[in-house]
Image (cartoon, coloured by chain):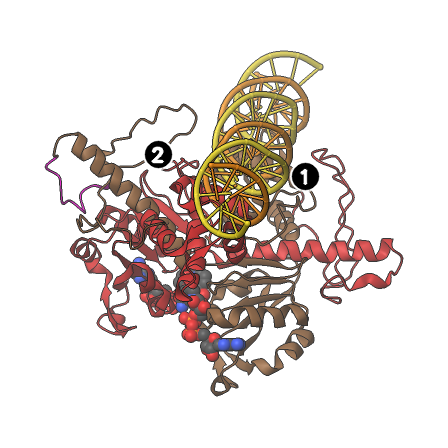
Chain colours: A brown, B red, C orange, D yellow
Amino acid sequence: MATGRTHRPATRSRGIPEATVARLPLYLRALTGLSERSVPTVSSEELAAAAGVNSAKLRKDFSYLGSYGTRGVGYDVEYLVYQISRELGLTQDWPVVIVGIGNLGAALANYGGFASRGFRVAALIDADPAMAGKPVAGIPVQHSDDLERIIADNGVSIGVIATPAGAAQPVCDRLVAAGVTSILNFAPTVLTVPDGVDVRKVDLSIELQILAFHEQRKAGEAIEAGEAAEAAAEADVVAVAVAAKRRAPADGSGSGSAGGSGSSGGNGKGSDGDVPAVMPA
Amino acid sequence: MATGRTHRPATRSRGIPEATVARLPLYLRALTGLSERSVPTVSSEELAAAAGVNSAKLRKDFSYLGSYGTRGVGYDVEYLVYQISRELGLTQDWPVVIVGIGNLGAALANYGGFASRGFRVAALIDADPAMAGKPVAGIPVQHSDDLERIIADNGVSIGVIATPAGAAQPVCDRLVAAGVTSILNFAPTVLTVPDGVDVRKVDLSIELQILAFHEQRKAGEAIEAGEAAEAAAEADVVAVAVAAKRRAPADGSGSGSAGGSGSSGGNGKGSDGDVPAVMPA
DNA sequence: ATGTCTTTGTGAACGCGTGCACAAAGATGG
DNA sequence: CCATCTTTGTGCACGCGTTCACAAAGACAT
Ligand SMILES: NC(=O)c1ccc[n+]([C@@H]2O[C@H](COP(=O)([O-])OP(=O)(O)OC[C@H]3O[C@@H](n4cnc5c(N)ncnc54)[C@H](O)[C@@H]3O)[C@@H](O)[C@H]2O)c1
Ligand SMILES: NC(=O)c1ccc[n+]([C@@H]2O[C@H](COP(=O)([O-])OP(=O)(O)OC[C@H]3O[C@@H](n4cnc5c(N)ncnc54)[C@H](O)[C@@H]3O)[C@@H](O)[C@H]2O)c1
């Protein structure tokens, strides 16, 4: 998940909670799908299922936008699509620049989902002189010397950074100085920006590490359970039916549906008994 | 940020809060930087600044791992690097498969940051027969017919999905059936998985929409302020002319009241004054 | 040994987000 | 017009996450 705003301790922006804002695009996507299939109305229950959220949460989210539903019927799909689009600012055109046209930057430039919702790739910028003029996804790459002019000429307020980590902060500073007030950062660095500028980051490495944490925990629990259950013979399974032997540690607590997990941890490795490289004092 | 776990209402995994787990990679990155510069110890204040978080939060995060600091001194960098790595499961090897080797998948395969921390690209999988055998980032692409065998042979438990949206759920199902229990999804779809399987998603489109929301809000506020202050000269909040002609309808309603529905959008503009395609009844 | 100074670890308060549960609103049928 | 049935909108309670603030722990100097 690309998470992480910077600064702004959850300022209830115009009355709409941040968590709600983050879900609106999800609803919008589900609604667009319904719209294409000409479904006229949808209930909170159905839409919530399509978006993968709780229906009460969805209703509360919509309540922040106003009362757009009809009791006993549900929500008018087209109308809701319009309202959410307007709320998110998608009824206007957002020129975007991508800085750093390498592997990732090029993939982003080629991404069709960009233009689909009000976003338009206004320019591609790279520091490599050899790339200047070369077209990527039909758009000629421009040299970063012209960054300020490009931002100004196109009225760009959203910038995407796909440069190496070391270049990210300097590029960010230039973008901000040139007038950009929203940045989507793919480089693995913490960007520092002045107040009034929003930064969101997408960090593949962090996502994988979070998954690894849970994966390790799952494997650990499985082993614990397995050993407790007396040297289960199912030692080196990997494929077997995933949650088949689900052992739910029955954590006891009532509310949280828990959801631990069983399942085979992939690597049945044994070599993890490493020792701290350095002791603390 | 790539956000979004699926299911699991924040089950305090092994006592470590989910929010803390999500920050550990951030700390680890900062610590690695210090380690490379041979800094022996670091205070919570310094490290927190480097990671872009509050120092109290950082100390509380570390307290979940144990008492690894020394009062009056700070934390031993090397020791902390090891502890966090171990906690995240990075001391072991995690074979990963990438499914869908298109623009994005190829960029991911080429991503160096992958191997840096215990993650190893075990295989690249694509449904296009024309791609089979072709090397991408030095690794030959394999056909998706062999998906199950590849997962099993390599003991893969983490899968990355970079296929078109339509193929994501079927691919996900096959991965899970084959034994994968953690999935990082780049396709713009809500994946449904059985209990015990973790899904995280990276959704560029959602990130942009969230930025657009705030961008619109900023523009609206700037105008409000400007008008209220009567052509005040302090217009240069950050980016002066950015989207200067937007006119947020300033819905006025306080919290919840939900009352003032009417008030038709205040955009007196000509061109962008779209009208709801359908009214709600 | 004692005092001072730095920094950790955490108790406690607070606010946000979530989900339950239900009254009210409105559709639908007779 | 009334009864019934569906579904919204939201009051409320609860738990997680964040932050403040401070006592305790230990380093270091004298
Ligand atoms: N490739 C991925 O899948 C992936 C995944 C996650 C994160 N990332 C991160 O995204 C960033 C880009 O990754 P990549 O694989 O595309 O790298 P890359 O080396 O292929 O591309 C980087 C590009 O940035 C350009 N560049 C360098 N300095 C610049 C500057 N100051 N101004 C403008 N352009 C500049 C380079 O000329 C190059 O074209 C890196 O920070 C990487 O860590 C990449
Ligand atoms: N390119 C981006 O920057 C970007 C950004 C955000 C999200 N995405 C999403 O990532 C996904 C991939 O984007 P892309 O630009 O690389 O698309 P792409 O069309 O270039 O690549 C898709 C690849 O998936 C393969 N594929 C299709 N069905 C498959 C199946 N059933 N099993 C295995 N492989 C299959 C195709 O052969 C193709 O090689 C899309 O869902 C897209 O929306 C892409």
Quadrant showing the C terminus of chain B: top right
Q: Does residue B189 show up?
A: no
What is the secondary structure assignment of the residue under circle 1?
loop
Q: Residues within 10 Å of mark 1 (few under 14, many from 20)?
A: some
Measured Cα–Cα span from mark 2 to mark 1: 35 Å
Q: Which amino acid does the dot numbered 2 rest on?
A: Gly
Q: Name the residue carrying label 1.
A: A66
Q: Chain of mark 2?
A: A
Q: Which amino acid does the dot numbered 1 rest on?
A: Gly
Instruction: Name the quadrant where ligand 1 sits.
Output: bottom left
Q: Is residue B178 magenta?
A: no
Q: Residues within 10 Å of mark 2 (few under 14, many from 20)?
A: some
Of pointers 2 and 1, the one earlier in the residue sequence: 1
Q: Which residues are magenta?
A: A232-242
Residue at horizontal 28 percent and vertical 51 percent from the top? A276
- CB within 8 Å, label 2 to label 1: no
Q: Is B196 situated left or right of A26 in this image?
A: left
Residue at horizontal 33 percent and vertical 60 percent from the top? B117
Q: Position of residue A48 (x, y in %)?
A: 49, 39
> Foreground: B8 or B269?
B8
What is the secondary structure assignment of the residue under circle 2?
loop
Do the residues indicated by labels 2 and 1 lie within the same chain of the protein? yes
Q: Is residue B34 above or below residue A8?
A: below
Q: Position of residue B161 (x, y in %)?
A: 35, 57
Q: Is A79 situated left or right of A228 in this image?
A: right
Q: Is residue B24 above or below residue A232?
A: below
Residue at horizontal 25 percent and vertical 51 percent from the top? A275
Q: Is A216 situated left or right of A86 in this image?
A: left
Q: Position of residue B242 (x, y in %)?
A: 72, 65
Q: Does residue B34 show up?
A: yes
Q: Name the residue carrying label 2.
A: A259
